[in-house]
Amino acid sequence: MKIITVLGARPQFIKAGSVSREIAKHKEIQEIIVHTGQHYDTNMSDIFFDEMCIPKPDYFLGIGGKSHGSMTGQMIEKIEEILLNEKPDWVIVYGDTNSTLAGAIAASKLHIKIAHVEAGLRSFNMKMPEEINRILTDRVSNILFCPTDAAMQNLSNEGFNHFACRTVQSGDVMQDGAIFYKQLAKKPNIEIDDDFVLCTIHRAENTDNELHLQNIMQALDEIAKETQIILPLHPRTRKMIENLHLTIHNVTIIEPVGYLEMVWLIDHCSLVMTDSGGLQKEAFFFKKHCVTLREETEWVELLEHEFNILAGSDTNKILSCVQTMRAKNSNFDVNLYGNGNASEAIIQEMMK
Ligand code: UD1
Ligand code: UDP
């Protein structure tokens, strides 16, 4: 069986890493990796391949830093050439980035089977580029691997039971990764207080909205007067902060870190604040509460269990949500994302 994996952005490296480890156990499967180049800085891309022993990409397309249409269009063209040449049995795509959509469109037009890992998630906010990417990718996929019951339910509500595809509750490949990489975690080489908050911000709705970004940074700077905030900063957010000349006095801003350092930070922090999708779950994997700097989340089960709270981008709401979550003493012993064997379930299903 020949599989082409299409990826290009940071969260996909982490997800694909777990599945690639599983594929490597099967001599009868050949995996060919196509990296679109959507993320290209060393600490947004190469570091994950090196540290997490993901096989080096067989093809690197170098298509990053462009508008959505231009990026996605150029990716489709290049991926199509590769698919025609390689003639794989399957294309695997992950999550909801422009690289995901490009892989799915190219494969579907050539009638090559598509496996979508992290299918069925919805924010119900069509302004998010990710919501558009995931809906379109789901619709043309042949097997949809859902990480949660809520994702299965979303697909059922949208009528997927009537489409020519399989929907499978596989569990979450990020849970697999968290378990595997915990043993390899590394402390970053910076001064870190015993009690610190870990924060990331990169979503378009926050970085591209001056008021949202200003409000969030103001809240962080206020909290950081009392408790250290470590903010590994996405290049997109750094550029916007510089363009707006925002002054931040108290937050410990660092370059994006590799996954092994990230796992250490999640494991040792006292609270997570983020607009990331993946980090909301990772907070839970490491038994940490999370304040989500968005108006909605795809990971609704975390809200239901009160491990997570939506704070949006209002300064006062963020401050009060942080207080609420810091006062909580939750029991995290509940299984929401599987037992860490999602990758195995995915490969078994694809081999059927
Ligand atoms: C992308 C995904 C988002 C995911 C995020 C993970 C889409 C639509 N969005 O958002 O779902 O959560 O990745 O991190 O696919 N940049 C660099 N160096 C890099 C990468 C990006 O400088 O290595 C800067 C460039 O200015 C670029 C901007 O960041 O134009 C945005 O990058 P892009 O890949 O378009 O979107 P992300 O915000 O990273
Ligand atoms: N991440 C990382 N280093 C960083 C910031 C994030 O390794 O400096 C990890 C994070 O823990 C998560 C993954 O990158 O596993 C993807 O997160 P990101 O926020 O980039 O994307 P999203 O999940 O929102 O699509």
Image (tube, grey):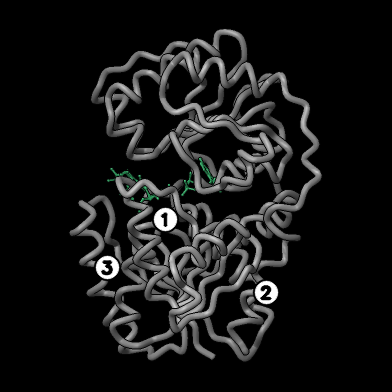
Helix, strand or loop at mark 3: helix
Q: Which mark is residue 345?
A: 2
Marks 2 and 1, the one that precedes in the sequence = 1
The numbered mark, 1 or 3, whose residue comes first in the sequence reads: 1
Q: Which mark is residue 75?
A: 3
Residue at image point 37% right, 75% down: 140
- How many angstroms separate mark 2 from mark 1 (CA)? 24 Å
Q: Which kind of residue does numbered mark 2 sit on?
A: Ala
Give the percent coordinates (x, y) of residue 304: 64, 40
Q: Residue at x 69, y 80 (%)?
A: 25
The vertical placement of 333 against 194, above or below, is below
Estimate the x, y position of residue 269 in percent, counting from the top left.
67, 29
Q: Residues within 10 Å of mark 2 (few under 14, many from 20)?
A: some
* Residue 241, position as x, y percentages in the image: 32, 25
Disc 2 under 8 Å from ligand 2? The reply is no
Question: Is the residue indicated by label 1 positioned so its CB lies within 8 Å of ligand 1?
Answer: yes
